[in-house]
Amino acid sequence: VADADTLFAEYHQGVFRYLCRVVGEADAARDLTQEVFLRVSRAEAPAASDDVRRAWVFRIARNLALNHLRDQRRQPDVAPLVDLTQPATQELGLALARALASLSEMDRDVFLLRETDGLSYAEVAAACDISPDAVRSRLHRARQQLRDALGQTLADRRASGIRFN
Amino acid sequence: MESFEVIGAFIDRERVDPEALKHALSTEEGRQYLVDLVALREIAIEQAPPAPVAFDRRAPSRNRTLATAAAFALSVLAGYMAGQRSPSRPLDDRPLPSPVVIEVAQPEAAPAPTQVIQLRAGTTVDAAGRN
């Protein structure tokens, strides 16, 4: 079974990225990332495949993020989670944060876990406690809404060229 | 538009029906959707602030800081409540402190004079009392 240090090394970047997008503050995301792995260190990681462990870590992260948002009693409406010395990047981050804030909590998390952390549908399903089919339909809905909300931003990105990640 | 789910699943590296994918991509709208999904993914994974570089098991997290502050406030409140509940007598009932008596010794009688100097007007007297 992987220990907390190993899981931290493997997943902390992804957990932090996800938490940044959800809570909207880099400092809070750093604290929450530490809290995620503190909980991981105190619990017994599933003695299963890497996929199951990754979904377990992100499930902890998601629960902490939701608790944090409930405590804050506010929406993550503004999130300049980018290099503030680059105005274009900052603008992009704000546009995405606003668009994400318009999604339902579950649709947002499904989208972020898939897009920013590359979880498979099965992993997202385990992290969010829904079925893989629900992940697929929620993801599609989230993408449609974001596509509509980020119309000009996407047009700008298309104009400058795209690269498959 | 629901048929475009297969395009999303394809770029998500999920297993898809090739015929459904071909059909979805056979339309201009479907191809535009594919391009937008790739662009959307790029935007979603734009550079984030630096993550914590190490896992600090003792790092003060916000929750633990709040818990510590709450524990401190609770202990102060408990102390205050305990002070409020303990019996206290009114000020007038309190026993007076024991009086402190300072005994001042009576001064002894002045010694008898060894020499009497009588002063008269117009007379000079030296230090030994002589005229």
Image: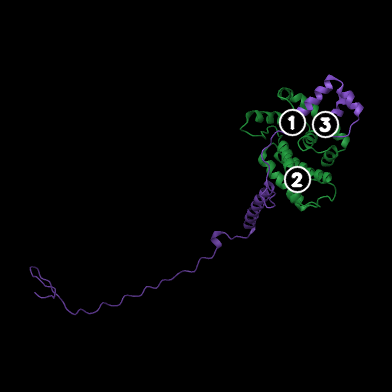
Chain colours: A green, B purple
Residue located beneath label 1 in the image:
B42
Of the numbered discs 3 and 1, the one sitting upstream in the chain is 3
Q: Secondary structure at mark 3?
A: helix
Query: In the displayed structure, would residue A101 be above or below residue B86?
Result: above
Three-letter amino acid code of the residue under disc 1: Glu
Q: Is residue B62 left or right of residue A110?
A: left
Residue located beneath label 3 in the image:
B11
Q: Secondary structure at mark 2?
A: helix
**At x 84% / y 41%, what residue is drawn?**
A126
The percent position of residue B6, horizontal first and vertical second, equals 87, 29
**At x 83% / y 20%, what residue is drawn?**
B29
Q: Which mark is residue A10?
A: 2
| Circles 3 and 2 on the same subunit | no
**At x 74% / y 48%, what residue is drawn?**
A37
Q: CA distance from mark 2 to mark 1?
A: 22 Å
**At x 65% / y 28%, what residue is drawn?**
A88
Three-letter amino acid code of the residue under disc 2: Glu
The percent position of residue B89, horizontal first and vertical second, equals 58, 61
B65 or B95, nearer to the observer: B65
Q: CA distance from mark 3 to mark 1?
A: 13 Å
Q: Is residue A101 visible?
A: no
Three-letter amino acid code of the residue under disc 3: Ile
Q: Secondary structure at mark 1?
A: helix
Question: Which chain is disc 2 placed on?
Answer: A
Furthest residue in direction left, as rendered: B122
The answer to whether mark 2 and mark 1 are in CB contact below 8 A is no
